[in-house]
Amino acid sequence: MPQTSGDMCIACQRSQGSTALKELRSNDPNYRSVISTFVDNWQAAGQAPRVQKILEVNLSRKGRNGYEAYRKYLERRAPPSEFSTFHSSQCVCDLGTKPSQQLCEYPSCGLCSAVRSNFTKFAFEAPHNVGSYGPGVYSYTNSARADKHATSCTTSPYRAMILCSVLIGKPPTKKSVVEGETVAVVDAEAIIPTHIILYSSS
């Protein structure tokens, strides 16, 4: 039977231009890989939080095509670097607590807005993040650093973080910044959400 997310199969959601989520089982090869990426890059005092669930992000065709088109654009100069980074925001819904894994539609939910729009919209439909390097999409190579930007609703036992893939051209241009733990890109096509990590809040 086809895999489902909400009331529609994942393939149907892709064909209709929407992003779908699929919860990974513990025996899925990607499950351990994502946990290792999260834990190994938790650079802070103490142990990393316990990962409770991992949701795989199945991008819409438009989102995937935009990322691959951006890759080809960068390859005109040289093969780009591809980073795994982490992005967090306020998550005001109870994502991960119900059998049907769906992104919410609350305007104030920055995490679901970012995933659904492929980083073209954030909480309250803001078109970008604002940070030290100007407007853009900000993510971090240190999962503990991203956690500082995570908030969750009081009814959820989880904190949520997005695992991302980011393309950076060689040499870097004014449209991208890699500085310490921070990776910032101006073009949303340069970054995609690959997984949502749900982890202990304590």
Image (cartoon, rainbow, N blue to C red):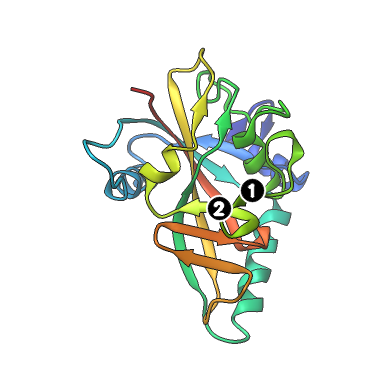
Apparent side of residue 179 relative to residue 100 in the rendered image (left or right): left
What residue do we see at 52% from left, 80% from top? 170
Q: Look at the numbered discs 2 and 1 and tell me whether their residues touch, using CB distance below 8 Å.
A: yes
In-image side of 144 versus 3 (left or right): left
For label 2, the SS is strand
Please tell me whether residue 41 is drawn above or below residue 74 in the rendered image.
above
Quarter holding residue 114 = top right
Residue 22 lies left or right of residue 104; in this view the side is left
Residue 129's disc number: 1
Query: How far is the residue under mark 2 from the one under mark 1?
Result: 7 Å
Q: Nearest the camera: 137 or 111?
A: 137
Amino acid type indicated by mark 1: Asn
- Measured from the top left, where is residue 42 in percent x and y? 31, 45
Report which residue position mark 2 lands on. Answer: 138
Q: Position of residue 35 (x, y in %)?
A: 33, 42
Compared with 74, 126 (above or below) is above
Residue 5 vs residue 81, the one in the foreground: 81
Give the answer, above or below, for where 176 lies relative to 17: below
First along the sequence among labels 2 and 1: 1
Residue at point 67%, 58% (across, down): 188
- For the C terminus, the image quarter is top left
Q: Residue at 35% across / 45% down in the picture?
A: 38
In the image as oriented, which residue stretches furthest toward the bottom?
A: 77
